[in-house]
Image (cartoon, rainbow, N blue to C red):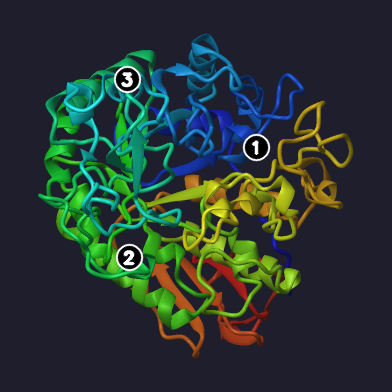
């Protein structure tokens, strides 16, 4: 018989979520939804999403079936890098609301059975942070300069940067300041934009400040922190030259003098002591770009952080052999430290996977072409069911449950990614995954708000909206809802640290977890596999015959159960 890509309704969301919320180890198999606040929901019609907008959409997130919400930065900021340049870590930027709005959001989320994780940006501040402004005003010798990396330049007049490090956003990682007397002076380090000076974590005041910041937000009731550039806080002693140019090509392949230094781990051990003072299962999640999953595992040892993003999985092509290899390596690396694996397909820094998978392999995680939309969506749906069947925790980026593609044709004049305006850095096309999401079929911003949107939404965006997909059998939204409901109802899906691989045709992944079996066809052709019981859910139309076989279309995942 023919099986449609939807399934039996999920358990009642409110009661199911509330049950999960009481578990202290909830994070080990949680599904965490990333909200990019400026692009989620706009409550006041200024074209920019805000905390009140997020709060108004909490019922949607509850009913989707996620366990927690991770909020990208909403702190006071000049917005040189979309809030990742923080001027005040204890204040909400007026464009997003105020501290009362944050408090109300945290409280309402708790009532809905959802946890709130906030972004923390400890590698660098804004150049408008009071420390940095004072450091500039006070000039050479200021004690405030010791809290950042100020250095004299090289050359006869100090006209050359102190070393050869390059910014992730392009160009040198150093900017020379003009001293209070008007003369060219020292240089300061910024691994990202010049408006984001790096903290010097060797200075005790920096550690004291961030331990205080942690307590501020924990006391307000947040359930954890996602740590931005968690691998970057400590720099190699003496800030040595790297000795090569085009350094971005080395990222992710080597331990760099400014990334993944062993000293970061002592910082996180101190932070863990603070977190463990608080009840309720609070957690840390590391954004740690490392050369290997084995080095990523160092961040989640029992006395450090709880989770670390699995970027190796995110960057894996739609290929059965490659996917199996990264799954095995991830599970093997996490097992000795007792940490759960994490799985993620999209976020605010990479091209949405519905577009990545629409393009030929080998183009990386920032892609400028739309590719084959139909193929991309088909693969994205299949990849989601594969990800949600793996043991550990999964992350969902806002809008992927709608099957949103990247907006690859934004005009130059509307782009806002700072990397776009600097040469030889990241591609600078992150705006495409940050376009505000559609809630309704019509309206000035498809239900995002009453006053347009800070990045233009493409024509036809409304046909991908929540309104257009809600209650529609086979829609991507209903596929996610069904998958998340089944995952919560079947504890073997997120639990554990291993899978039992089953024999499968070339290009097909099949594994068992208790009474549950997941089969994924990554090829462009239909395949026939055993029917491992009743079909629970499928990303495409699956033909399960009476002869005990199942025919899977191209780029399709199916979930079976023996009971």
Does the residue at mark 2 contact the one at mark 3 (Cβ under 8 Å)? no
| In the foreground, 551 or 323 | 323
Rendered location of residue 316, percent (x, y): 45, 71
| Residue receiving disc 3 | 137
Report helix, strand or loop for mark 3.
helix
Instruction: Determine the image quadrant of residue 218.
Output: top left
| Residue receiving disc 1 | 39
Q: Residues within 10 Å of mark 1 (few under 14, many from 20)?
A: many
Q: Residue at x 50, y 70 (%)?
A: 364
Whichever of callouts 2 and 1 sits on the residue coming sooner in the sequence is 1
Whichever of callouts 3 and 1 sits on the residue coming sooner in the sequence is 1
Rendered location of residue 143, percent (x, y): 17, 22
Report helix, strand or loop for mark 2.
loop
| In the foreground, 125 or 274 | 125
Whichever of callouts 2 and 3 sits on the residue coming sooner in the sequence is 3
Q: Residues within 10 Å of mark 3 (few under 14, many from 20)?
A: some
| Residue receiving disc 2 | 252
């Amino acid at each position: 018989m023919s099986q449609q890509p939807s399934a039996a309704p999920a358990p009642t969301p409110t009661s199911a979520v509330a049950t999960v919320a009481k578990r202290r180890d909830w994070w080990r198999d949680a599904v965490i939804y990333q909200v990019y606040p400026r692009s989620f929901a706009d409550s006041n019609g200024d074209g920019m999403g805000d905390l009140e907008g997020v709060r108004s959409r909490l019922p949607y997130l509850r009913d989707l079936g996620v366990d927690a919400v991770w909020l990208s930065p909403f702190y006071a900021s000049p917005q040189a890098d979309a809030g990742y340049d923080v001027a005040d870590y204890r204040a909400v930027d007026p464009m997003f609301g105020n501290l009362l709005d944050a408090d109300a959001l945290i409280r309402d989320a708790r009532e809905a059975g959802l946890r709130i994780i906030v972004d923390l940006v400890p590698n660098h501040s804004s150049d408008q942070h009071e420390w940095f402004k004072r450091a500039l005003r006070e000039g050479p010798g200021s004690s405030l300069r010791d809290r950042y990396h100020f250095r004299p330049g090289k050359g006869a007049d100090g006209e050359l940067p102190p070393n050869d490090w390059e910014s992730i956003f392009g160009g040198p990682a150093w900017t020379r300041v003009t001293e209070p007397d008007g003369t060219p002076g020292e240089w300061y380090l910024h691994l990202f934009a010049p408006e984001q000076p790096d903290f010097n974590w060797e200075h005790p005041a920096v550690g004291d400040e961030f331990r205080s910041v942690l307590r501020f937000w924990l006391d307000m009731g947040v359930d954890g922190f996602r740590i931005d550039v968690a691998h970057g806080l400590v720099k190699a002693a003496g800030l040595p030259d790297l000795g090569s140019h085009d350094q971005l090509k080395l990222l992710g392949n080597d331990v760099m003098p400014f990334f993944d230094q062993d000293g970061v781990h002592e910082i996180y051990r101190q932070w863990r002591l603070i977190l463990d003072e608080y009840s309720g299962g609070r957690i840390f999640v590391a954004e740690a770009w490392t050369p290997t999953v084995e080095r990523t595992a160092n961040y989640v040892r029992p006395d450090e952080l709880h989770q670390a993003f699995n970027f190796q999985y995110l960057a894996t092509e739609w290929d059965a052999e490659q996917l199996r290899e990264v799954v095995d390596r991830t599970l093997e690396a996490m097992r000795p430290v007792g940490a759960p694996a994490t799985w993620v397909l999209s976020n605010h820094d990479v091209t949405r996977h519905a577009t990545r998978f629409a393009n030929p392999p080998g183009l990386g995680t920032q892609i400028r072409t739309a590719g084959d939309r139909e193929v991309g969506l088909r693969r994205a749906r299949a990849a989601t069911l594969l990800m949600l069947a793996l043991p550990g925790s999964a992350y969902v980026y806002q809008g992927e449950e709608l099957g949103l593609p990247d907006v690859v044709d934004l005009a130059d004049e509307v782009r806002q990614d700072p990397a776009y305006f600097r040469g030889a850095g990241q591609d600078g096309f992150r705006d495409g995954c940050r376009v505000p999401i559609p809630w309704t079929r019509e309206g000035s911003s498809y239900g995002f708000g009453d006053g347009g949107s800070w990045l233009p939404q493409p024509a036809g965006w409304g046909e991908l909206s929540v309104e257009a997909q809600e209650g529609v059998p086979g829609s991507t939204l209903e596929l996610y809802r069904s998958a998340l409901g089944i995952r919560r109802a079947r504890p073997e899906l997120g639990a554990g640290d291993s899978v039992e691989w089953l024999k499968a045709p070339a290009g097909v992944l099949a594994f068992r977890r208790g009474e549950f079996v997941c089969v994924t066809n990554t090829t462009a052709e239909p395949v026939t596999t055993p029917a491992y019981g009743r079909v629970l859910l499928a990303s495409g139309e699956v033909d399960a015959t009476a002869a005990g076989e199942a025919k899977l279309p191209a780029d399709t995942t199916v979930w079976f159960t023996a009971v």
